[in-house]
Image (spheres, rainbow, N blue to C red):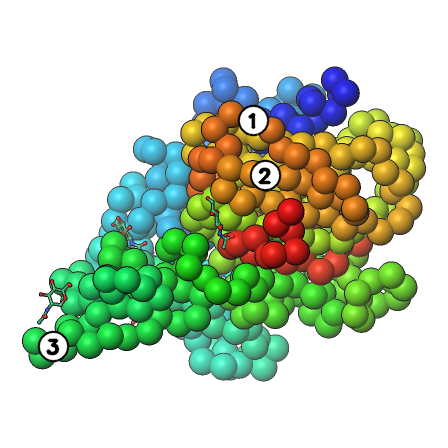
Amino acid sequence: MAILQTAVCLLFLFIVNCKSQASFYTRGINVEALCEECDTTTGSGYVYHPKYCHLFVHCTIGQDKRVVGQVKECTRGLLWSQKVKQCVWPEESDCPTNPCFNQSLTLRDLRTCNGYFTCTDALRLQFNCCDRNERFSEVDGRCYKDYACNDACLPNSSNSTAKLQPCDRFEHPDNKGKYLWSISGTNITMDCAVGTAFSAEMCSCTDNADFVNIAFCDPYIYFPFDINIKDKMGKTASGGLNSWIRTSEPAAVGNGAVYFDGKRQVIAWAMNNMEFKSNFTLSFRFKADLVGPAGEERYALVDNSDCAKEATFGVALLKTSPKTGTIHGGFRLKNGEAVTASSDELSLTSWHSVVLIKNGHKAELRVDNNIYPIMGYGLQSDIDRVDCSMTIGKGTGLENFVGYIDEVKFYKCVPDEFKN
Ligand SMILES: *[C@@H]1O[C@H](CO)[C@@H](O)[C@H](O)[C@H]1NC(C)=O
Ligand SMILES: *[C@@H]1O[C@H](CO)[C@@H](O)[C@H](O)[C@H]1NC(C)=O
Ligand SMILES: *[C@@H]1O[C@H](CO)[C@@H](O)[C@H](O)[C@H]1NC(C)=O
Ligand SMILES: *[C@@H]1O[C@H](CO)[C@@H](O)[C@H](O)[C@H]1NC(C)=O
Ligand SMILES: *[C@@H]1O[C@H](CO)[C@@H](O)[C@H](O)[C@H]1NC(C)=O
């Protein structure tokens, strides 16, 4: 049991040796030399990326005590700030190549071939996309015809360049799924889109609002992994490093599952900095394909740690013998507590289903037909928020997963089937 507890804590407690990410980020840049500037006395440090303000270098002490640099990305149009050592709104960033300080600069959005950021009013970064079948060239900041580039234009990820307008929308007195819109001096009642609720703070219907009034608990994000790595619910753009579907796995649901070969990952960008509140369900199936003796390696399954910050939810696999392992899952809460549970030992040669649930003050990990309650102090506290996306197959401080993952579903609520 002692071993299990350590493994559980490590899922949330920090960055050890991280493997290098996509090599195109680092092209032409000596990351290790940059890390010499880094203060790594606490085990890890951060430094500017010399070319792009939306990238930064995370320096960690490697196994052999050498400093290892890894290039990471601020998403959603945010830029790196060396002063506060995190991604901030462009107007707050002290980055020397901040395009908001030099309006002739444009930044490529590394998530797609056609997205880019500009800053026209010296205040906010603006997200743009080239037309269909055009590629953005960072050499001269223009779009060029390229039929190989057909990425979808990601949802507008920057914090609008428009000046703030006074809010002309108000809370509906008794229905969070509606709002009052003041038009020419008259309040008319409007409906929020299904699955959203009105937030006076945002002056719009948002998915970050109180979900208690939702009638049906449908998945917010669903990766069936049958023909591609897209979200069937259409809520998130997804990406990943060389992620592809393997269709030959007989026990996959539908036509396939993603095979992770130790270098792959699938990312759900929409979950970056998401407010989870206190109702959360994550479910998926997996089958490991690990070879070699057990060294008590911890493998990432699904979490939100892959951006140099601690995960606020996660499920990991601890290999306990060549053919067995245990599952660990939990949350980091707004009250500062990390709460986790561990499964019994299970065979790594077959498929398993995993569900991680938080339903108000009750949290649990389910593996196959077994329920493992998650214990801890202050469980009624909400799940903490972090500027990281959900990543499948890869996580900070964990080995990259090797094996199949299928049917990944994330809900901002708890479906009835998991309520008792
Ligand atoms: C703005 O960027 C351009 C292109 O990189 C450069 O030539 C120019 O000197 C920069 N201007 C300032 C004020 O930094
Ligand atoms: C993003 O929002 C800005 C300001 O509202 C708009 O001008 C721009 O066209 C939007 N970009 C995309 C890709 O939707
Ligand atoms: C927009 O940016 C400001 C800071 O400049 C921040 O306080 C605010 O929360 C942001 N709005 C959204 C919708 O993210
Ligand atoms: C519209 O509703 C808001 C909020 O209830 C209220 O403050 C405002 O006075 C109303 N406006 C009109 C014209 O009734
Ligand atoms: C969310 O959690 C609360 C407890 O905090 C519970 O009362 C409510 O039923 C949950 N809502 C959903 C949609 O699961």
Circle 3 Cα neighbour tier, 10 Å, few/some/many (<14 / 14–19 / ≥20): few
Q: Quadrant of residue 130?
A: bottom left
Q: How far apart are marks 3 and 2 (CA)?
A: 45 Å
Q: Say which of 49 and 212 sits in front.
A: 212
Q: Say which of 196 and 90 sits in front.
A: 196
At label 2, the amino acid type is Ala
Task: Identify the residue shown where x is 43% and y is 54%.
Answer: 212
The response on whether ligand 4 sits within 8 Å of label 3 is yes
Ligand 2 - quadrant of the structure image: bottom left
Residue 361 horizontal/vertical position (percent): 51, 37
Q: Can residue 134 be seen in this view?
A: yes
Residue 296 horizontal/vertical position (percent): 80, 27
Task: Identify the residue shown where x is 80% and y is 54%.
Answer: 404
Q: Quadrant of residue 3?
A: top right
Q: Name the residue under label 2.
A: 363
Among numbered discs 3 and 2, the one appearing first in the sequence:
3
Q: In which quarter of the image is the N terminus?
A: top right
Q: How far apart are marks 1 and 3 (CA)?
A: 50 Å
Q: Mark 3 points at which residue?
A: 186
At label 1, the amino acid type is Gly
Q: Distance between the residues labelled 2 and 1?
A: 9 Å
- What secondary structure is found at the residue carrying circle 2? strand
Confirm or deny contact between disc 2 and disc 1 (CB under 8 A). yes
Among numbered discs 1 and 3, the one appearing first in the sequence:
3
Task: Answer above or below: position of 235 versus 101.
Answer: below
As drawn, the residue found furthest toward the left would be 185
Task: Identify the residue shown where x is 17% and y is 63%.
Answer: 167
Q: Mark 1 points at which residue?
A: 376
Among numbered discs 2 and 1, the one appearing first in the sequence:
2
Residue 285 horizontal/vertical position (percent): 76, 53
Task: Identify the residue shown where x is 70% and y is 66%.
Answer: 224
At label 3, the amino acid type is Thr
